[in-house]
């Protein structure tokens, strides 16, 4: 008895849509088991994790705050991954975006003007894009694996930020805490509906980016180029598309979005720079991208789901005494299940005995499914 | 002289986890599988090693637990990528994310607790020799395991029929399958071996390097081990050299911060100036050195297209579904 | 059929069936191979030959039927078991490891644990004794296709098989190398071994085979003695009466026609350690003519195609000229805009993106040339226009598929190739360059494609066809040049071309630019 995969002649449209839902359900089951093992009532846990964080309007704002960077980074990553470009350094690009966007408010703390904020956002995007260009250029020029280089740059970015806030950018009046000055009002990303909560415009950027990229990827020749180069690079070259140019563009695009997320969080939420400005958004966004099946609209939903696990994790810590790391475990399990369920899109699973095993994979090249010539 | 010996010892201790993890991943990649989950398996090994050592009082049981947990964790990866044919890059990444999460969760109770340290080897007479005594006969057990692993894997890959078979799978899993070689089974064993090695490396971290538990204490070593495999062109002895170079960089920047520049006034001018320059850098910049070095090394190696083409296992990272 | 139980048959197959999903690849096949016999298994692409022998070799399990070996019923469950029985197989697609030596490759396929040096010595001795010399220490990656096939054959013979199955062995050989192979086969027969020879090449089969079994659409349509049949009667058994012969009207006014493709002193360094450099290639293709390039695989055809198509550009812009304009510095898109169209050898992954729909694959090669029709503002794709163009191609080329707009990978090889060729023909290009137009394609689709290429030429375009199939080239070309080791011979007009002459050039026997008495002027 063994598990066998039988290739489908065409990808299953049904499972393309169902797969994330099945994965989510499986994660809930696994999570229930996990909670039971550590002595927590699973139902109580789910209420705390998924229901309570949605029960009040200000909490929905918190959800939007957490979801915004996840969606922004996630849609950028989805374009990369569809291009078969493995940007794992979004966390670093997020940080560099936050730093670059903070140049004006930190170095010119008393400069107040309506152009400060737009400039900050722009510089954040440029900073993220420039940082992302490094692994892209190394890949294009030297054929260096972008997974490892983009990841090493994350550690470097974290250390660089640490140095900045403890060193040259430390607030001289900040009682020696490792942080910069508080941004003045013109440098703070405003809330969308200040009366009901704190959700800032980062969420709007996220939605706009998602819709825009969905249109580009699905409806334009640029999106076609990315999809072809990602799935069949030689066919892409045959089509006249430039792989190198695409790699750099796609890296810079996702870097810019990650940088925008970074400056949005720094400006809209924290209002200053600190040694740690991200609870791992850059990595969680990877999960968001896959859960959303690399589709920008799906990523909006996935981002909200994962933002929920962040909030749930914080709530569970106080309400249930459970470590907030549980959220991380949830997220990791979710990604695993998503990947496993994705197999069903390309293959049917069969439990094979010792007898005649059927393999549809062999059929296609041998003969035509229809009769006669 | 004593200081020098101690410094050399710290280099070995820093290099050992890199070497062990790299050797394990090297075998995995030779079979054609790319497991990016090394960091995750390593941190799981670290928490398991510490936990088991603390709870049983025996660091040896801790080491065993580290190996077993690393292997079991890799089984998850093996099932996904080998039986379900999922994308190896994404699955490896998720293994790392899961490992970091689970280890953080399991380790919350361990923070701040005193750890068990594996005892150093002691052979009468031999270990008491000056210089050589400590370096060759006075190290921790994992150091010796790492050397044996390196030599053993080198012999296995290039001198045994089983090793040849493994390499052939990495070259062309389609051809291997056509010849009746059980590709999936070999790959499962390779992945488990790699998981055990990564777990062992993690155990070394929490039972030798710093006998305690700190969240994320692997600090990216798993990724560096992956880079080392590329740097070594998938050859064990080169991985040994690479691991020690990186060990030097890793521990070197800590030493530079700690040493007193005055002690080097009599030293050669170049050495003095280098240390002076390094000491003037902020500590964060020094801490960046291993990661920067990894990028530089990767660039240098991948520049040589011919070298890459001739040595990379041709089926690396490609999913394999046997047809029957 | 006749049962020769008098002296015992080596292999008897009764009612063997193999089903893939809804497809009966083999449908109650009967086959008998006597001892000391070379038995042909005839059929065109898709007839079920490969499936049948994979079942005999244990790579696939039959759904029903019986196999008897030397009079005893057997169930062949694995290649290992087949080898123990005494069945050896040389596949069409080799199972070799490029980074390992020939000896290591052979060692991996043998089950014993003897040291490699011993295996190497045995292999060397055997190879020399059978007239197929082999250096055991050579790296497979460095070897030519013919040399690699020798490794496969020696590896098979080392296990002392009684029955040797060969799947399309001459498709990768020059005519002279094929002759050597036939000598080896006749020697094996003289030793009392049997050979199951799979082919669709009728002249070969008539030459060396004692008996033949013909398959069509998975069923046996007849058994015969090939020597008593004509090539025509064998072809009729293989494909029935459904395929029209290709009609090639003679070229008119060729001397005054403009050269639409001019290649002058094209050279290219090897791109990878394992690839072939191109040396000083020159060629002209005029409007209205079909030029064929013959050659065994691995002599630079792929590299040549990439250089002509613009996937690899030239330093000298005049090295490739299309319709009188320098094209060397242009990429694929630039050359397409000059009026050229290209069809590469590999369908899935090069000519088409496997995971994308047919309509998207149409856009693949025509997004720039048909920009006005297919693209709107800001680069949006006019999917309606693309879809209707795709439908037009599907109808024109009679592409069979199971869904309105399926993924490319879901089509059979022949139908996908029809689509890919049709997509280019739909543009009515002035120049068409095709690499292996009908490889792996069934006879009906192949004839359709070849006729379409001829008609394109006769309507005023220039057509360049690279093919390993000499029969095909003789059918459609007005002149044939030969590529060997990265060099191209002068084109020989079809009237002066013979199999022997082309075969010698394919083997490199004559220097690349040997002067011929009659050139194409």
Image (spheres, coloured by chain):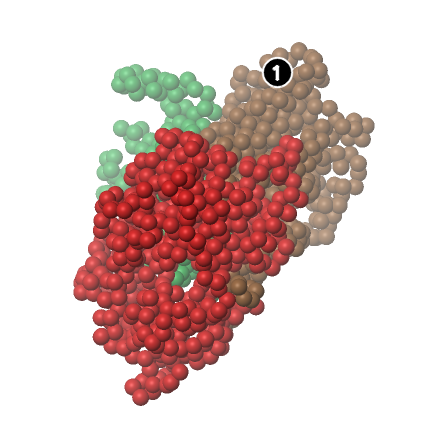
Chain colours: A brown, B green, C red
Write the residue at 76% across / 43% down. A52
Q: Which residue is mark 1?
A: A104
**Between C218 and B175, which is closer to the camera in this rendering?**
C218
Q: Residues within 10 Å of mark 1 (few under 14, many from 20)?
A: some
> Residue at horizontal 65%, vertical 35%?
C376
- The one nearer the camera, C112 or B58, is C112
Numbered-mark total: 1
- Viewer-side residue, A252 vs B268: A252
Q: Position of residue A311 (x, y in %)?
A: 69, 39
Which type of secondary structure does the marked residue at label 1 adopt? helix
Q: Is residue C273 left or right of residue C385?
A: left
Please say if C13 is above or below A173. below
The answer to whether residue B143 is visible is: no
**What residue appears at the point 30 percent right and 29 percent down from the top-left corner?**
B4
- Residue C364 found in image quarter: top right
**Picture coordinates of residue A203, whole percent (x, y):** 70, 32
**Residue A358: percent from left, percent from top:** 52, 68
Above or below: residue C512 compared with residue A111: below
User: Given the image, what chain letter belongs to the residue carrying mark 1?
Assistant: A
Residue A255 spot, x, y in % from top left: 56, 30
Front residue of C327/C158: it is C327
- Compared with A359, A333 (above or below) is above
Q: Quadrant of the N terminus of chain B?
A: top left
Residue at image point 60% right, 24% down: A124
Is residue B129 visible to us here? Answer: yes
């Amino acid at each position: 008895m063994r598990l066998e995969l039988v290739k489908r002649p065409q990808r299953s449209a049904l499972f393309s849509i169902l797969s994330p839902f099945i994965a989510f359900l499986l994660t809930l089951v696994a999570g229930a088991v996990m909670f039971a093992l550590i002595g927590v009532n699973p139902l109580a846990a789910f209420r705390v994790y998924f229901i309570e964080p949605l029960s009040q309007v200000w909490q929905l704002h918190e959800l939007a705050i957490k979801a915004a960077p996840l969606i922004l980074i996630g849609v950028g990553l989805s374009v990369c991954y569809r291009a078969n470009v493995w940007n794992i350094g979004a966390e670093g690009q997020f940080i560099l975006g936050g730093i670059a966007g903070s140049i004006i408010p930190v170095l010119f703390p008393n400069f107040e003007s309506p152009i400060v904020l737009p400039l900050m956002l722009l510089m954040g995007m440029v900073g993220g894009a420039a940082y992302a260009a490094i692994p892209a250029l190394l890949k294009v020029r030297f054929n260096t694996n972008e997974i490892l280089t983009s990841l090493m740059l994350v550690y470097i970015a974290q250390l660089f930020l640490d140095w900045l806030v403890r060193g040259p950018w430390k607030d001289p009046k900040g009682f020696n805490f490792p942080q910069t000055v508080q941004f003045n009002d013109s440098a703070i990303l405003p809330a969308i509906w200040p009366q009901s909560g704190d959700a800032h415009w980062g969420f709007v950027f996220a939605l706009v980016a998602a819709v825009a990229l969905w249109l580009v990827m699905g409806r334009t020749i640029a999106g076609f180029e990315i999809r072809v180069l990602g799935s069949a690079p030689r066919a892409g070259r045959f089509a006249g598309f430039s792989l190198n140019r695409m790699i750099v563009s796609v890296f810079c695009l996702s870097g810019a979005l990650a940088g925008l997320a970074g400056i949005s969080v720094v400006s809209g939420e924290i209002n200053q720079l600190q040694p740690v400005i991200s609870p791992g958004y850059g990595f969680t966004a990877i999960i968001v991208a896959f859960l959303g099946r690399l589709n920008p609209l799906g990523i909006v939903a996935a981002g909200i789901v994962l933002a929920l696990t962040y909030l749930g994790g914080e709530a569970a810590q106080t309400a249930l005494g459970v470590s907030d790391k549980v959220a991380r475990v949830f997220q990791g399990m979710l990604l695993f299940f998503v990947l496993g369920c994705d197999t069903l899109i390309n293959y049917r699973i069969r439990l094979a005995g010792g007898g005649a095993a059927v393999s549809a994979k062999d059929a296609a090249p041998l003969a035509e499914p229809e009769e006669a010539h | 002289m004593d200081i020098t010996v101690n410094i050399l010892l710290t280099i070995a201790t820093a290099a050992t986890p890199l070497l062990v993890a790299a050797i394990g991943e090297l075998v995995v990649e030779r079979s054609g599988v790319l497991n990016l989950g090394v960091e995750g398996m390593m941190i799981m090994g670290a928490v398991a090693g510490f936990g088991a050592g603390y709870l049983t009082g025996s660091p040896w049981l801790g080491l065993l637990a580290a190996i077993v947990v690393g292997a079991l964790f890799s089984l998850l990866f093996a099932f996904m990528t080998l039986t379900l044919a999922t994308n190896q890059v994404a699955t490896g990444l998720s293994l790392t994310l899961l490992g970091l999460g689970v280890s953080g969760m399991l380790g919350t109770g361990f923070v701040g607790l005193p750890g068990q340290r594996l005892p150093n080897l002691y052979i009468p007479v031999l270990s008491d020799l000056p210089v050589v005594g400590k370096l060759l006969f006075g190290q921790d057990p994992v150091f010796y395991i790492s050397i044996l692993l390196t030599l053993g894997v080198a012999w296995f890959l290039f001198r045994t029929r089983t090793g040849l078979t493994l390499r052939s799978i990495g070259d062309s899993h389609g051809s291997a399958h056509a010849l009746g070689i059980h590709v999936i089974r070999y790959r499962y064993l390779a992945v488990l071996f790699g998981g055990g090695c990564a777990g062992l490396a993690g155990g070394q971290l929490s039972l030798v390097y710093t006998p305690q538990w700190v969240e994320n204490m692997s600090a990216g070593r798993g990724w560096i081990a992956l880079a080392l495999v590329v740097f070594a062109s998938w050859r064990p002895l080169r991985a040994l050299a690479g691991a020690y170079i990186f060990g030097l960089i890793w521990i070197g920047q800590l030493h530079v911060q700690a040493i007193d520049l005055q002690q080097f006034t009599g030293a050669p001018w170049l050495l003095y100036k280098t240390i002076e320059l390094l000491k003037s850098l902020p500590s964060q910049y020094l801490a960046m050195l291993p990661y920067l070095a990894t990028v530089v090394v990767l660039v240098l190696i991948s520049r040589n297209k011919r070298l890459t083409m001739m040595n990379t296992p041709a089926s690396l990272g490609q999913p394999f579904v046997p047809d029957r | 059929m006749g049962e020769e139980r008098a002296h015992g048959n080596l292999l008897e197959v009764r009612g063997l069936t193999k089903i893939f999903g809804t497809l009966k690849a083999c449908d109650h096949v009967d086959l008998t191979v006597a001892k000391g016999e070379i038995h042909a298994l005839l059929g065109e692409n898709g007839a079920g030959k490969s499936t049948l022998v994979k079942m005999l070799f244990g790579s696939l399990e039959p759904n029903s039927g019986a196999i008897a070996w030397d009079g005893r019923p057997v169930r062949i469950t694995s290649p290992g078991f087949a080898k123990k029985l005494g069945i050896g197989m040389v596949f069409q697609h080799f199972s070799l490891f490029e980074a390992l030596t020939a000896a290591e490759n052979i060692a991996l396929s043998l089950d014993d644990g003897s040291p490699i040096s011993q295996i190497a010595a045995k292999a060397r001795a055997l190879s020399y004794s059978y007239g197929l010399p082999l250096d055991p220490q050579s790296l497979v990656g460095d070897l030519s296709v013919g040399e690699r096939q020798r490794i496969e054959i020696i590896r098979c013979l080392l296990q002392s098989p009684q029955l040797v199955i060969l799947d399309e062995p001459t498709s990768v050989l020059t005519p002279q190398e094929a002759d050597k192979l036939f000598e080896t086969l006749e020697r094996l027969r003289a030793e009392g071994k049997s050979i199951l020879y799979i082919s669709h090449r009728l002249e070969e089969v008539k030459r060396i085979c004692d008996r033949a079994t013909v398959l069509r659409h998975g069923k046996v349509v007849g058994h015969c003695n090939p020597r008593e049949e004509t090539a025509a009667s064998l072809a009729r058994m293989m494909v029935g009466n459904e395929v029209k012969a290709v009609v090639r009207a003679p070229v008119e006014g060729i001397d005054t026609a403009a050269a639409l493709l001019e290649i002058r002193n094209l050279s290219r360094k090897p791109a990878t350690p394992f690839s072939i450099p191109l040396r000083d290639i020159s060629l002209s293709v005029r409007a209205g003519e079909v030029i064929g390039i013959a050659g065994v695989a691995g002599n630079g055809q792929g590299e040549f195609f990439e250089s002509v198509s613009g996937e690899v550009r030239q330093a000298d812009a005049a090295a490739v000229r299309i319709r009188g304009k320098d094209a060397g510095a242009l990429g694929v898109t630039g050359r397409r805009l000059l009026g050229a169209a290209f069809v590469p050898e590999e369908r899935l992954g090069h000519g088409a993106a496997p995971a994308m729909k047919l309509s998207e694959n149409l856009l693949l090669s025509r997004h720039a040339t048909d920009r006005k029709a297919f693209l709107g503002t800001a680069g949006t794709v006019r999917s309606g226009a693309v879809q209707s163009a795709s439908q037009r191609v599907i109808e024109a080329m009679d592409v069979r598929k199971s869904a309105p707009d399926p993924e490319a990978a879901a089509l059979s090889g022949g139908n996908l190739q029809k689509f890919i060729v049709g997509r280019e023909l739909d543009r009515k290009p002035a120049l068409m360059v095709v690499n292996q137009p009908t490889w792996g394609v069934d006879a009906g689709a192949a004839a359709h494609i070849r006729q379409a290429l001829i008609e394109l030429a006769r309507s005023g375009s220039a057509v360049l066809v690279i093919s390993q199939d000499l029969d095909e080239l003789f059918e459609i070309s007005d002149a044939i040049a030969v590529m060997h080791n990265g060099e191209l011979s002068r084109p020989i007009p079809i009237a002066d071309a013979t199999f022997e002459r082309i075969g010698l050039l394919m083997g490199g026997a004559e220097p690349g630019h040997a002067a011929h008495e009659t050139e194409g002027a």
